Amino acid sequence: MAETLFTGIAQLVTPAPGPQRGAAMRELARLENAALLVRDGVIAWVGAEKDAPKVSQTHDLGGVAVVPGLIDPHTHAIWAGDRLADFEARLAGVPYEEILARGGGIRSTMRATAAASVGELVHLARPRLEALLRSGATTAEVKSGYGLDFGAEVRMLEAVRELEATFPGTLAPTLLIHVPPTEGREEYVRGVCEELIPAVTARGLATAVDVFCEREAFTVEETRAILMAARARGLGVKLHADQFHALGGVELACELGALSVDHLEASGEGQVAALAASNTVATVLPGVTLHLGLPAAPARRLVDAGACVAVGTDLNPGSSPLFSAALALALAVRLCGLTPAEALTAGTVNAAAALGLRDRGALVPGARADFLALHSADWRDLVYTLGENPVRDVVVGGQHIKE
Ligand code: NIG
Ligand code: FE
């Protein structure tokens, strides 16, 4: 039995376990001069240091704030090529959707990614995931979606599996059906439902399926067909919806009981009300707001209406080259109007729920011992700091990964 008592915690701050919605997102538990006991990778006890059980191994954190490990519920961390020419074109005034419609954007990343081997994809993605981990993400979702042809989609998921073998935290693989081929989209959707999803499920390569529901991507009806096929195979379902246009993707997500619906920059009152009345997590991606200059998702209104809001980086080369989970929370406070407490809940227990995970995100007995020691004694520095990493130590399953 491996036991370590972590002491020297000026402030231990955590949301309550399970997804939190509405005003409950602001209710953090805060313990001063705390200690935390880890047994076999799981939190065994949390309390005041003076009441701590006596154990042979202790680790003094030196008087800093401790928060749960962050969970990044939305990344496209695997890609080849770059989007630097797109970046310049956009700065010169060409819209993101127009670049995509001309065959660039996501489609150019698909060409580069489809041409790469699994080994090359792993080599390119590893440092990105390491950066996320250093920024506090002890769990990260990773999507496919730059494959287009089915073989390349499967290679992306094989790359996630290979990365999992060396990543100290947890990776959650999602099959993303991103944009349709320029010809034969009906056969493509049928193939996704009848060949790709069964093949991916049979090999256990993904735990969820995501569809980009948008004018330049899939219609609501195509999205429905793909997600129904995923659900029939026992996979979780997610959507990219309302990034540019509110087409009905949010309503579909709520109807299907999706784990999450992500983006929401174009969502209005109807979508906010639908999400508030559902158990689907509303995931906002402030890196996209910053990088594309889009309106911010209505996170403030979503919380006020009683929805369950999560925050992700959306790490990808086109719309959000954001390599820090902590910075995603800092941006959610500035751009989306979340309070610091709401942002912490959004990046921990609510992000876990967006991945269908219930064993992490809160520092309570029985949860995975994934936590962060900050440089600061005040946890609010996690979401205050810009451009410097507020995270000093990353602890995964009770093991120090970064000090
Ligand atoms: O979540 N909008 C759709 N998909 C990604 C962007 C992918 C890309 O631009 O390469 C997103 O923003
Ligand atoms: Fe995305």
Image: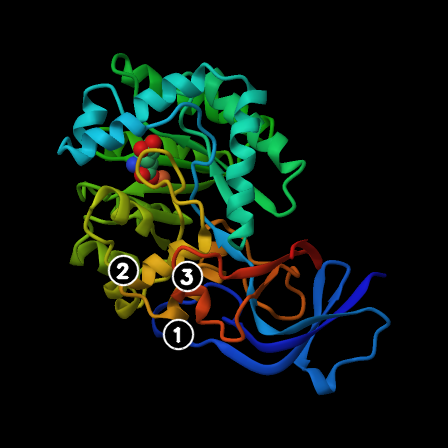
Q: Amino acid at mark 1?
A: Arg
Quadrant assignment for the N terminus: bottom right
Indicate the quadrant where residue 270 lies: bottom left
Q: Which labelled disc corresponds to residue 346? A: 3
Q: Gap between marks 1 and 3, in whole Å? A: 10 Å
Q: How is the image coloured?
A: rainbow
Q: Nearer the viewer, mark 3 or mark 2?
A: 2
Q: Gap between marks 3 and 2, in whole Å? A: 12 Å
Q: Look at the numbered discs 3 and 2 and tell me whether their residues touch, using CB distance below 8 Å.
A: no
Binning the other alpha carbons within 10 Å of mark 2 as few (below 14), some (14 to 19) or many (20 upward) gives many
Q: Residue at coordinates 67% horizontally, 66% vertically from top-left? A: 366
Relative side of 165 to 325, left or right: right
Q: Amino acid at mark 2?
A: Cys
Q: Amino acid at mark 3?
A: Ala
Q: Secondary structure at mark 2?
A: helix
Q: Gap between marks 1 and 2, in whole Å? A: 15 Å
Q: Tag 2 or tag 3, which sits nearer the N-term?
A: 2
The answer to which of 398 and 244 lies nearer the viewer is 398
The x, y position of residue 126, in whole percent, is 56, 35
Indicate the quadrant where residue 85 lies: top left
In the picture of the structure, the residue carrying the numbered disc 2 is 336
Q: Secondary structure at mark 3?
A: helix
Say above or below: 230 vs 326.
Answer: above
Relative side of 251 to 15, left or right: left
Q: Residue lying farthest front?
A: 388
Residue 329 visible within the image? yes
The x, y position of residue 353, in whole percent, is 48, 55
Q: Look at the numbered discs 1 and 2 and tell me whether their residues touch, using CB distance below 8 Å.
A: no
In the picture of the structure, the residue carrying the numbered disc 1 is 26
